[in-house]
Image (spheres, helix red, strand yellow):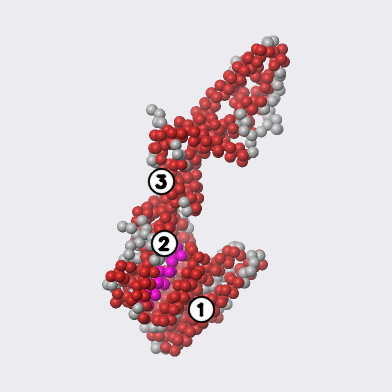
Amino acid sequence: MEQDDLQIVHALRGGDSTAFTALVEKYKKAVYGVILPKVQDFHQAQDLTSETFVTAYLSIESLDAPEKVGAWLCGIARNLTNKWLYREKRDDLSFEGLLENTSESAHKAELLQVSAAEKTPDQTAEHVELRQLLWRCLISLPDISSEVLILSYIREMKSAEIATFLGISRTAVTTRLSDARKRLKQEMIRMVENTIESQPLAEDFTEQVVTEAIKRGEQYLADGNWKSAREQFQRAADVQVDYAPAYRGLGMVAREMIEEQLSPPDGMVDSTLIEEACTELARAYRLGARDADTVRALAHLYHQFQRCEEYVDLLWNFAMTTGDFGAGFDAGCRSIAEMQEPCVADHKRAVDAHKTLLKRFDGKATLTDQLESYFHVFDAYRKTGRAANWLEQTEHLVDQIGDELTLMHCALYTRERGKTLREWGCHQEAAHTFEAFIDWLQKTEIVDPEKQALLIGAQGDYLHLAPTYYQLGEHQKVKTLLAEAEANLESYLIERDTALASITDETETTRKRLEQTYRNAGGYPTGGSVADIRRWLNRKYFIAIHIATTCLALGCAEVGEGDAAIRLLHRAAQHWEQRRDYIQEEVRVWSSGGRIMAWLAAMSLKFRNDREASLEYLKRAHEDRRRAARGSIKRFFEEDEAFEAVRHDPEFLAVVNAPVVSQ
């Protein structure tokens, strides 16, 4: 029994994909009949019919009157057809118009042969199939009817000439011509119906539906229209089960909604939304969506909401299976880095995984890649008693890399080496290591926006030179070093302003000058425009100055210079608020506002014993919802000895335990 329109639409909106088949079967003739006379091309009519149903399926929620679905479909068909006619600059001709525009003088049999094999140059391709249909219809008519039509429309004879030629009256000619036209229309309609029956919708119709749904979903996602994006991706999933891009889209929508919920100061994330995002992206990954963006999005969710084991397993699986070396090696490094964190704390596993990673990418990983992988796993080597092995391997790699060693890699190697020496009690040797790096940094001619940041960081907390002097009792060196670092910070701001002010136009000359200056700097946008380079430079300076300021502040704190530390952290917070618009993407990845406020909360207690200020800073730290969601603020409160006196204070506990994710 045929379903009525209300039943079909209701079932379709409920996700019943079989209802769509019923809709197609019920209305495909009507839709095809609306389109064919206009486009005059069977194949194009078939394509537009498919497009009509694809559009209808993906827009079914917009149908206000389900009982009028037929009229709605025909309206879609007309709109699509008119757009096609406009694009192709074709005339909208009726069947009669086609007859009236068909003029070839020859006998009936001869005309049939001409239509099949002797097309004149000015005959256009869009009329060929309908002409063939016309001749098939003419053959099927009684001879007398077909003769009258041919003489009138093909031979262009007048009624009197036909009457004389056939030996009948002019009235008989008029009557037979009218009858023949009616018969021809009926025959053409019958043949069109047979054509529709014999030519079902394209075999790739399902693919058309999901492709169009994904395309629309991606556009809605880019526009921030989460509801419409989710509907489109869900439609694609309903039509084709186990279609990875559909679930990837659903996961991405949920992820963006989570980010939106985390944005307000008092934002609360819906836990079901977190589960939805993780479930859909994980399903997409299992079904074959192994691209770096999908993996990165899912890993970010796992990391953000403390699903540490899932984070480790996902990245490790990707590293061990992907054919994309760069993305795979990076994923492996991040996986082993997380194995060292408190939520996993399996240091032996991290060391073993590191060896496996190097073996997996043997022959592909450069010396620099290998060195960088060691930086990710330093704590694991140290805590398993293999720090000496780490130093031996990294020193060997540094010697092999030689002059190709980047600023950042040199800084990381120096930091970890110096840290190990300090732990071994070799403070003087550690100081010499740090001093040698600073000396090298000051002498090198490399131009990089991060260079000053590394210098200031080396003088402050990043390389622990000031704390090392402090441990050696060389307090005057500490004061001199910190004074130099603050002076360098002031000159750093001038360097940034001068560099940006020098970009006065976007000419090719300016682009080449900038490339010549910064081409060896980390992350330089090779091949980019002047505008691209300016954005990169602005962002690079912002991040580097921010890090330099906080490193100097932490260095001051470690040597007991509390007032200087607090002053510098206030400066870092102000810098962050003033410039954060330039780096919105980085804000989402590593929002430092909460970290700065947490440090200020700790230092207000440690150096000033100011409980009220500390509590206020902690509240502001918790406003960084992304950091709060990761639990890092709570862990900081529980682990930093500065909070010992308020560890059980109800007001402090109320702040650090305030939920970010709904239960």
> If you read the primary sequence from the N terminus, does the residue marked by circle 3 or circle 1 appear first?
3
Separation (CA) of disc 2 from disc 3: 36 Å
Q: Nearer the viewer, mark 1 or mark 2?
A: 2
Residue at 43% in and 33% down? 67
Q: Please identify the quarter of the rendering in which residue 650 is found.
A: bottom left
Which element type, helix, strand or loop, lies under badge 1? helix
Q: Which residues are magenta?
A: 587-603
Chief SS of the magenta region: helix
Residue 568 drawn at (x, y percent):
45, 78
Residue at 40% in and 69% down? 594
Compared to 604, does 21 lie above or below? Answer: above
Residue 301 drawn at (x, y percent):
39, 59
**Residue assigned mark 2:** 264
Amino acid at pointer 2: Pro
Amino acid at pointer 1: Leu
**Residue assigned mark 3:** 242
Separation (CA) of disc 3 from disc 1: 55 Å
**Residue assigned mark 1:** 489
Quick check: can you spot residue 319?
Answer: no
Which element type, helix, strand or loop, lies under badge 3? loop
Label 3 Cα neighbours within 10 Å, binned few <14 / some 14-19 / many ≥20? some
Rendered-image quadrant of the C terminus: bottom left
> Any magenta on residue 304?
no
Residue at 37% in and 52% down? 276
Separation (CA) of disc 1 from disc 2: 32 Å
